[in-house]
Image (tube, helix red, strand yellow):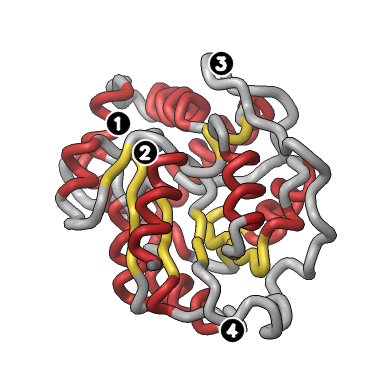
Amino acid sequence: MDSGTTPRTPSPGSPPSRPSRPSRPSRASGDSGPASGHRRRAHIVWDWNGTLLHDIDVVLEATNACFAELELPRLTLEQYREMFCVPIPVFYERVLGRRPADEEYARMDAAFHRHYFARAERAGLAEGAAELLVSWGDSGGTHSLCSLAPHERLRSWVSELGIGGHFVRVDGDAGHGPRLGKARQMARHVAALAGVDRQRTVVIGDATDDALAAAHAGVRAVLYTGGSHSRRSLEAAGVPVVDSLAEAVGVAAELAG
């Protein structure tokens, strides 16, 4: 579930990776880099929460704290991964057995984010993420970031973790993305990537909504099992599913040709 605050310490059991060298000079977040030097290179559009950022433990704790307030049963990690989906109201419908009213959804959303923000400093980069950003760039590829986390929080997040300079564009949510899904945002993001060939562009994410958004934008996708979804639910999207970000980048390279 996309959220935003600035993490400083690693999540338990998954020490955050740190860049193996100083990050490259940052481009303006939300703006594409110049077309020259980037045209027709293989390009990865990364998801943030649950993909580059390992925060599933924080998300589960925040979800269960929210549910305790609302007198709803706790979820195990396996249950959460089977039930979670975007748009978020559909996830709550699966939990409640009915679609939440707007006021009820707003209350649940506020409770979740309050608990998430209180714990989010424990989240860190997923294993190997920093090294993969460097190696993909060294091989001539480019990166961008498209997330349902609030835009300004996302910019601060990647800056704090020292990885902002790897991205030619960073786009977070500016409105009601978690209620609607990422498709329109992804289409705008891909359209704004100067000099990037859609045929050589691959989205890497942890949710079936990432695959739907990629298809809507006319690009391909690889899904990663380390975040919010079970392998079974990810496989229903009909795109490659992998168990590590290193595998995801390898498959992306094959898809991008």
Tell me the distance, in whole angstroms, between the alpha carbons under discs 2 and 4.
32 Å
Q: Which mark is residue 80?
A: 1
Question: Do the CB atoms of the residues marked 1 and 2 lie less than 8 Å apart?
Answer: yes
Counting residues from the start of the chain, the first of labels 1 and 4 encountered is: 1
Label 3 sits on residue: 12
Residues packed near mark 1 inside 10 Å, few (<14), some (14 to 19) or many (20 plus):
many
Q: Secondary structure at mark 4?
A: loop
Q: Give the left or right position of residue 5, taking residue 228 as reference.
A: right
For marks 1 and 4, give the one nearer the viewer: 4
- The structure residue drawn at horizontal position 78% and vertical position 70%, both measured from the top left corner, is 28
Residue that appears at 65% across and 61% down: 151
* Number of the front mark, 1 or 2: 2
Is residue 104 in view from this perspective? no
Residue 228 - label: 2
Q: Residues within 10 Å of mark 3 (few under 14, many from 20)?
A: some
* Badge 1 amino acid: Tyr
Which of discs 4 and 3 lies nearer the camera? The answer is: 4
> Which badge, 4 or 3, is on the more N-terminal residue?
3
Q: Secondary structure at mark 3?
A: loop
Give the residue type at disc 3: Pro
* Alpha carbon distance from label 2 to label 3: 17 Å
Mark toward the start of the polypeptide (2 vs 4):
4
Circle number at residue 195: 4
How far is the residue under mark 1 from the one under mark 4?
A: 39 Å
The Cα–Cα distance between marks 4 and 3, rounded to whole angstroms, is: 40 Å
